[in-house]
Amino acid sequence: MREILGRRRRLSLRRAGRSAVLTAALTYATEWQWPVLPGVGLRPGIGRVRECGCPDPDCVIPGAHPFDPGLLAATTDARMVRWWWTNRPEAPVVLATGGRAPCAVSLPAVAGARALAAFDRAGVRLGPVVATPTRWSLLVAPYSLEVLGELLHSQDWVPGSLRFHGEGGYAVLPPSPTGAGRVRWERAPRPAGAVAGRGGRPGAGRRVDGLARPWLPDVATVIDVLVEQSAGTPGGDGSKLAY
């Protein structure tokens, strides 16, 4: 009897997790107008170790990347989002970064925790922070390659462990299941429209097309601390122009 109850509880939790992923995907796409698509996901398996659903047996980001459909399929259409996650309820939610959607800067989890502590000490207001067991991503307002290039050129060096997700890139959003563990919010999105963005810049807390979006900082606000705190992490030998 105890074993049967345990199975029922695990099944109930799995169904709840599937429902949460669909609900989150719809919120991103329809309320925030962030274009999303399902990630490749994981192959069915036993235990904690599960392989990526893509053909690469050595995939370094198992489950947490686009494959079929490709990144260009990202959409804000509610019908498409419902169809995708009804057919693939455990697929990760992938955000197509750039354009009118957020961009992101990611770094190792240890460096991310140090960076957030430094921002808090300095009283810097952050936007959403996405966390996996291995890496954290700070969502920022959309930036161009030219703006990012100028910011990185002004640095003495840029750690190789720091990665930038801009136009043509992607980031995985909570509560996606991945090979590294379930994605979560380390810092949840602030209530939409609660704070006006600096200078009314796109995506910085104002209403766009009648829809409220979470507030996002400019990449220039966070780049110096992220570069500093990424030093000394694995892959952090870097270069002056690592972007």
Image (cartoon, rainbow, N blue to C red):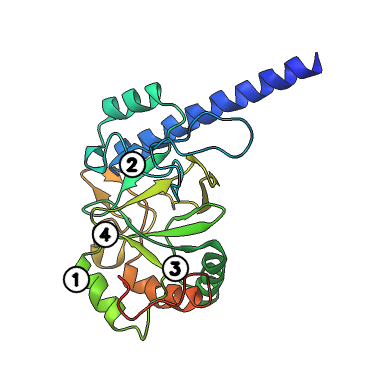
Determine whether, in the image, residue 60 is placed left or right of residue 170.
right
Determine whether, in the image, residue 8 is placed left or right of residue 53.
right
Q: Are marks 4 and 1 in contact (CB under 8 Å)?
A: no
Q: Amino acid at mark 4?
A: Pro
Q: Is residue 105 among the parts visible in the rendering?
A: yes
Q: Residues under labels 1 and 2: Cα distance? A: 26 Å
Q: Nearer the viewer, mark 4 or mark 1?
A: 1
| Residue at mark 3 | 161
| Residue 109 location, quadrant | bottom right
Q: Residue at x 46, y 39 (%)?
A: 52
Which tag, 1 or 2, sits closer to the chain's start? 2
Q: Amino acid at mark 2?
A: Pro
Question: Element type at marker 4?
Answer: loop
Q: Position of residue 34 (x, y in %)?
A: 30, 44
Label ID, residue 66: 2
| Residue at mark 4 | 142
Closest to the observer, 209 or 128:
128
Question: Element type at marker 2?
Answer: loop
The quarter in which the N terminus is drawn is top right
| Residue 54 location, quadrant | top left
Q: Nearer the viewer, mark 4 or mark 2?
A: 2
